[in-house]
Amino acid sequence: MNTDKPNNPPAFPTHHNVHDPRTDGFFSEQGMTLRDWFAGKFAAAIISTIHSGEDYNRIKSIAETYNMNTSQWISWQAYKQADAMLSERETQGTK
């Protein structure tokens, strides 16, 4: 099993510097990473499956088996899926 972290580029790369009025300097703003963007999409997809109290309780029950609350479990699953997406991008040769 490969335990190396996959390439995680910026989701919306920019090629400009941003002025920081506090220091009167400039810095490069990268924004969120592709991993964060993927995880946000997966979290939204998981949440979109909750249509009733029964649905919520199903996810809550799963989360509790991992000693997590529902939000922690959704976040954990979302990042696991995001990591899988990044790994597959590398497998396919997409950087």
Image: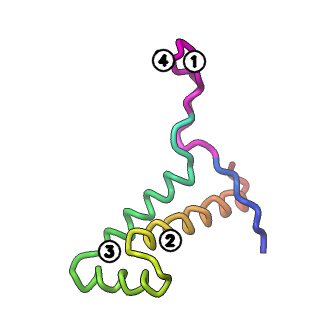
- Mark 1 or mark 4, whichever is nearer to me: 4
Which amino acid type corresponds to the residue marked 4 in the rendered image?
Arg
Magenta stretch encompasses residue 10: yes
How many residues crowd mark 1 within 10 Å: few (<14), some (14–19), many (20+)?
Answer: few
Decide: is 78 above or below 40.
Answer: below
Between tags 1 and 3, which lies in front?
Answer: 1
Where disc 4 sits, the SS reads: loop
Whole-percent x, y for residue 30 in the image:
57, 35
Tell me the element at label 3: loop
| Few, some or many residues within 10 Å of mark 3 (<14, 14–19, 20+) | few
First reached walking from the N terminus: tag 2 or tag 1: 1
- Label 1's element? strand
Residue 18 spot, x, y in % from top left:
52, 21
Q: How far, Cα to Cα, is label 2 from label 1? A: 36 Å
Q: Kindly identify which residue carries mark 2.
A: 77
The amino acid type found where label 2 is placed reads Gln
Tag 3: amino acid: Thr
Q: Position of residue 80 (x, y in %)?
A: 57, 68
Give the mark nearer the N terminus: 3 vs 4: 4
Q: Which residue is mark 1?
A: 26
CB atoms of marks 2 and 1 within 8 Å: no
In the rendered view of the protein, which quadrant contains the N terminus? bottom right
Residue nearest the viewer, comparing 21 with 14:
21
Of badges 2 and 1, nearer the viewer stands 1
- From this view, report whether residue 23 is shown above or below residue 84: above
Q: How many marks?
A: 4
In the drawing, what numbered circle is on residue 89? none
User: Residue at the top extreme?
Assistant: 24
Mark 4, residue position: 22
Foreground of the two, 48 or 61: 61
Residue 49: which numbered mark, if any? 3
Is 33 part of what is drawn in magenta?
A: no
